[in-house]
Amino acid sequence: MNLHTWWLFLATVFVVCAIPGPNMLLIMSHGAQYGLRRTSATMGGCLSALVLMLAVSAAGLGAVLQAWPTLFNALRIVGAAYLVYLGVKAWRSPVSESGADASDAMAEALATRAGRSPAALFRNGFLVGGSNPKAILFAAALLPQFIDASRPTLPQFGVLVTTFAVCEVSWYLVYAGFGTRIGATLKSRRVAKAFNRVTGGVFVGFGAMMALMRQ
């Protein structure tokens, strides 16, 4: 792979990763609720799922999904249902009555509940990151365009995946950082409730769009 090809891939992926989607929404939401440090677990889950999808595409399984539309549609519906579930859960998420009067100790206690553990946040990120099988087809169509068939494929694949991961994590930090900055405003019960409703509505919207997608 020559340097010009790599720069072209970098520019393409940088723009693609910046586009808001379920991953970025989840990371921003978690950044607002749990802070940047705890949201790193969510980022790890999302990134792991996407890297796995790239590996699946490199293995040629993207072609399998294209050849088996029933399998693709089944995965798509499952992914859409999970996003809708997250949306409903966010919409109905309880908001503290005490609002701005909540103590730091109580906030920390809520943040460290079992359901908010790093493992749970990682799992949440992984499931959202892997909820869209369209990403496998996208990767299967994108990566080959930047692979030089006259050279060993594996090292090129390693460079492309590493570049993708760096771009993706960079945007994760931007979205999580933005979420962290608005987190303080969520101490207001009314603002927190509105945030949950907007986040839930957008997740449901993503799920609906995915359910209506066609291969």
Image: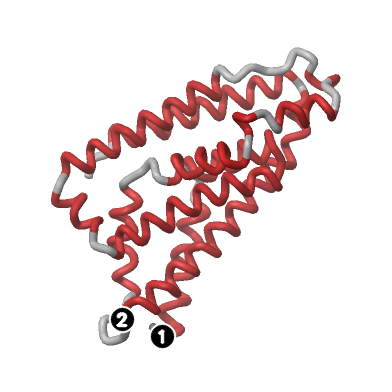
Q: Residue furthest left?
A: 67
Callout 1 touching callout 2 (CB < 8 Å): yes
Q: Is residue 45 above or below residue 155?
A: above
Q: Residue at x 62, y 41 (%)?
A: 118
Mark number, residue 117: none
Pick whichever, 90 or 190, lies toward us: 90
Report which quarter residue 26 is drawn in: top right
Amino acid under label 1? Asn
Give the residue at x 55% y 64%.
166
Q: Position of residue 199 (x, y in %)?
A: 55, 29
**Which residue: 29% across, 70% down?**
144
Judging from the image, what secondary structure is the residue with disc 1 in? loop
Residue under numbered circle 1: 2
Q: Residue 128 appears at what percent x and percent y?
A: 45, 40
- The amino acid at mark 2 is Asp
- Tell me: residue 171, above or below residue 86: below
**Residue drawn at 46 percent across, 63 percent down:** 13
Label 2: few (<14), some (14–19) or many (≥20) C-alpha neighbours in 10 Å: few
Disc 1 from disc 2: Cα separation: 9 Å
